[in-house]
Amino acid sequence: MRGSMVASKAVDERTLLRALLRESPSEVLVLDPETLLIVQANPAALKNLRYRLKEVRELSPLQFLTPDDAPAFQALLNQLRSGRKRSARIKARCQRADGTRYPVEARLVYSNENGRPFFLCVADDVSQRDATRAALAHSASDMQAIVSHIPGMAFQIVRRPGEAPVLRYVSEQSRQLLGVRASALCADPQAFFALILEEDRPGYLERLAETAGGHLSFNWEGRIWLQAWKDVKWITIRVSERVTADCTLWDGIMLNITRSKEAEAEIDHSRARLRALAAHVESAKEQERLYLAREVHDDLGGNLTTIKIGLSCLARQFPSESTPLTERVRYLDNLVDQTFEAAHRIASNLRPAALDFGIVPAIDSQLQRFGRNTEIAYEFRAPTDEIPLDSAAAIAVFRIVQEGLTNVAKHARATRVRLELVRDRDTLHLTLTDNGRGLPAAPNGMARPVFGILGMSERAAALGGQLVVRPAPDQGTELSLRIPLSGPAAAAG
């Protein structure tokens, strides 16, 4: 009975050993210590080596190894056989039956069970692991190369639960950008704040405050003073947040935008000079118009009055009955009246006399003329109080309204317009809306530039205001003008 139990136990152990070898993902080889031929190989070894068991039993592991690895493998076997080592590890490259190679890490053991010595080799294919490590190393190298070529400074801030944020990484460009070494900046992050100009520090602190104290996802632009170069630089900071399982990370980049700021300032300066030139040209044009209007009104009007008086004297000299001369004088008198009207119209177009009474009467007069000439219905709403506009601003607003109404008459195909003036304490808001066909579009679907609109925009900009032309809420086009009011009258309002 006892013998039967021992035999059963031995059978169970052998069955268990075979099952473990069959299911093991590692390659297992049993070697004869004298011939070094393979005695046994598990399925994982046969699959990876791409041999059948019968073929493997006629080979030695030394035939699988590359010429560089075989001597080291042989030396380890000799040390195990001599007893100098109980086990050994080796990393080598094996060659499959089809000639392809792969790296392995193997553990060698020498055993002598019941007087039957053998070598046991357990190997693992590490090609995937090595490829992953190489990819990671390559990725890190690429990332370092990318960071080193960024025209600015990269940095990373980390905060773990219950701890204050720490500046963990700063790229080497910090020395070029800030004049501070990366290690020094990591050790003392406040060194950056000391570089910010005094007048820009409140904006920087305000941005930090807006991020709820320590939440550093924000964008900021400002100036820093570099003592080493005695120079001021414009920089921009862009920071984004990432949350991981154990910490919060903020990845940021700091760029030198001095050149772009200088170019932007130059462009703004050029635009200001162009606007000043345009304003000067418009002012000169308005002065010329005023001069011509006065010339037409005074000189031409005076001459026409003298002619009319002369014709009246001539008419009294003729007999009472109708004669060809009498008819001719009446014709000339009627022509003088028409010329009077034409002179008045020309003078009004050059410089509306209604402007002398304020912007509201001038616009109302223009709308009346617009309604008569186009038969388009109009609605006008304006404050009853006087609007404080100086002469230049009043002329500019009037010309914008005049141009807007001209565009409606020429292009809108509208049947109704609505003009509204609204005065805030220090702002005048003008809205002109029509129910026409809307803004013209180019073939690509984008609105075409209209020089009349560009001219109106420049007039508004010269007043320190803004003009917007957009589709009306329901139908047609809406012209919106907003300009600041200035002077004692505006302050009193």
Image (cartoon, grey):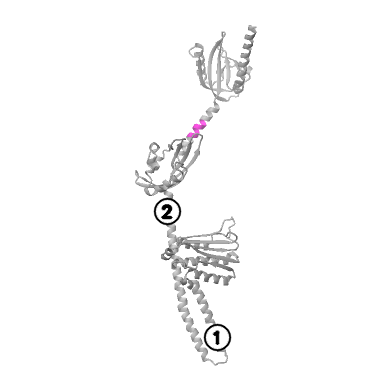
Task: Give above or below for 114 relative to 476.
Answer: above
Residue 464 vs 168, above or below: the answer is: below
| Residue at position x 44%, y 70% in the image | 287
Q: Is 39 situated above or below 373?
A: above
Is the residue 111 above or below the residue 439 in the image? above
Instruction: Say what amino acid the circle numbered 2 marks.
Output: Ala
Q: In x, y percent, where is residue 57? A: 61, 16
Q: Is residue 75 left or right of residue 201?
A: right
User: The C terminus appears in which quarter of the rendering?
Assistant: bottom left
Residue 137 on the magenta span: yes
The quadrant the N terminus occupies is top right
Residue drawn where x is 42% and y is 63% of the image: 491
Q: Which SS class for mark 2? A: helix
The x, y position of residue 242, in whole percent, is: 50, 39
Q: How many marks?
A: 2
The magenta stretch is 134-140
At numbered mark 1, what does the secondary structure look like: helix, strand or loop?
helix
List the residue tagged with mark 1: 330
Give the residue type that dot 1 points to.
Arg
Magenta includes 15? no
Most common secondary structure along the magenta stretch: helix
Crowd tier of the residue under label 2, counting other residues whose Cα lies within 10 Å: few below 14, some 14–19, many 20 or above: few
Q: Nearer the viewer, residue 48 or 222?
A: 222
User: Does the CB distance between marks 1 and 2 fall below 8 Å?
Assistant: no
Residue 37's x, y, as percent?
Answer: 58, 14
Residue situated in front as seen by the camera: 319 or 252: 252
Residue denoted by label 2 = 265
Give the mark nearest the N terminus, 1 or 2.
2
Q: Quadrant of residue 97?
A: top right
